[in-house]
């Protein structure tokens, strides 16, 4: 069973770590019977009326757990994790829900709303009334992004993985088959493109961040020759927090 644990607003503008990094560190706190499938970054609305650190993004950890009874211990560990690593001046929030929770459709709608308009804490609390949602300092505005992170990730079609199968350790040139062994599907975006073959190579540009599509990690590439493809995404400066 997948359990979604969302984090938001745990950092400050001048910090050397962001919410994405804190979310990735959560793997170290997982119970022995659980494993981390991945961490998904979710981009929310950027608007001058919304206070945010750098990009108004939040993060969701997808935890593969034996069953729903692990939710409580994951929440406890998430709270301890945030209280240990959040930075003074931030407004951290946590949300957690199981994949079969009846509240997820409403959380999905809420997450989509957070990408399109300004929402309030009151809305977040209402939509997450049957799942765990908690603030841990400052204004507690992080509950908005945390709830949105869970909803968008649960939709299976939003966000990009910032951790998945140790993707940060992949070489600059890697075969399609090696990526697929890590459960990362390679998909060409070229018009009338052929399907990448297992023995083809992908030029990663040193930065692989698959998209979450169809509940899978999808790396979108374009042709770079007969047996070569290149990752269409690349790292932007000031993304170090993720």
Image (tube, grey):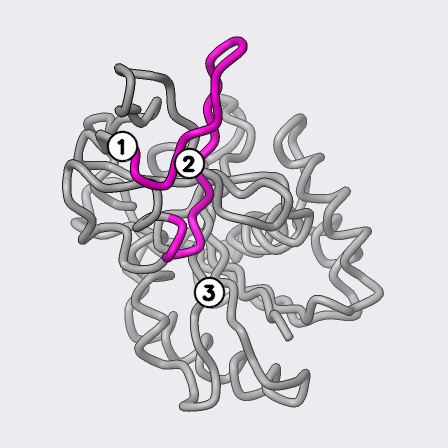
* Residue matched to label 1: 202
Residue plotted at (74% across, 52% down)? 107
Asked if residue 41 is among those painted magenta in the image, a careful observer would answer: no
Q: Is residue 198 found inside the magenta-colored segment of the image?
A: yes
Horizontal placement of 60 versus 121: left or right? left
- The answer to which of 19 and 165 lies nearer the viewer is 165
Q: Which residue is mark 2?
A: 219
Q: Earlier in the sequence, mark 3 or mark 1?
A: 3
In front of the other: 114 or 168: 168
Residue with the most extreme right position: 102
Question: In screen coordinates, is 95 left or right of 16?
Answer: right
Q: Which mark is residue 212?
A: none
Separation of marks 3 and 1 at Cα, in angstroms = 23 Å
The image position of residue 19, as x and y in percent, is 36, 53
Q: Is residue 189 above or below residue 41?
A: above
Which label was assigned to residue 37? 3
Q: For the residue labelled by badge 1, is the local secondary structure a helix, a strand or a loop?
A: strand
């Amino acid at each position: 069973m997948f359990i979604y644990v969302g984090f938001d607003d745990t950092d400050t503008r001048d910090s050397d770590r962001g919410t994405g990094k804190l979310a990735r560190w959560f793997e170290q706190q997982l119970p022995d019977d659980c494993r981390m499938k991945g961490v998904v970054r979710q981009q929310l609305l950027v608007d001058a009326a919304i206070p945010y650190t750098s990009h108004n993004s939040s993060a969701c950890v997808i935890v593969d757990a034996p069953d729903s009874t692990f939710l409580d211990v994951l929440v406890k560990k998430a709270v301890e994790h945030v209280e240990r690593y959040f930075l003074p001046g931030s407004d951290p929030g946590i949300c957690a829900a199981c994949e079969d929770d009846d509240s997820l459709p409403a959380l999905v709608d809420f997450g989509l709303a957070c990408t399109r308009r300004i929402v309030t804490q009151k809305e977040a609390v209402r939509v997450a009334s049957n799942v765990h949602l908690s603030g841990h300092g400052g204004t507690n505005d992080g509950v908005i992004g945390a709830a949105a992170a869970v909803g968008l990730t649960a939709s299976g079609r939003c966000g990009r993985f910032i951790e998945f199968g140790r993707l940060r350790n992949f070489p600059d040139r890697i075969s399609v088959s090696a990526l697929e062994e890590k459960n990362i599907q390679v998909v060409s975006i070229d018009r009338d493109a052929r399907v990448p073959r297992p023995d083809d190579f992908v030029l990663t540009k040193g930065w692989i961040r698959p998209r979450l599509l169809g509940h899978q990690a999808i790396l979108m590439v374009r042709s770079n020759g007969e047996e070569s493809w290149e990752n269409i995404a690349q790292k932007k400066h000031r993304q170090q927090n993720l």
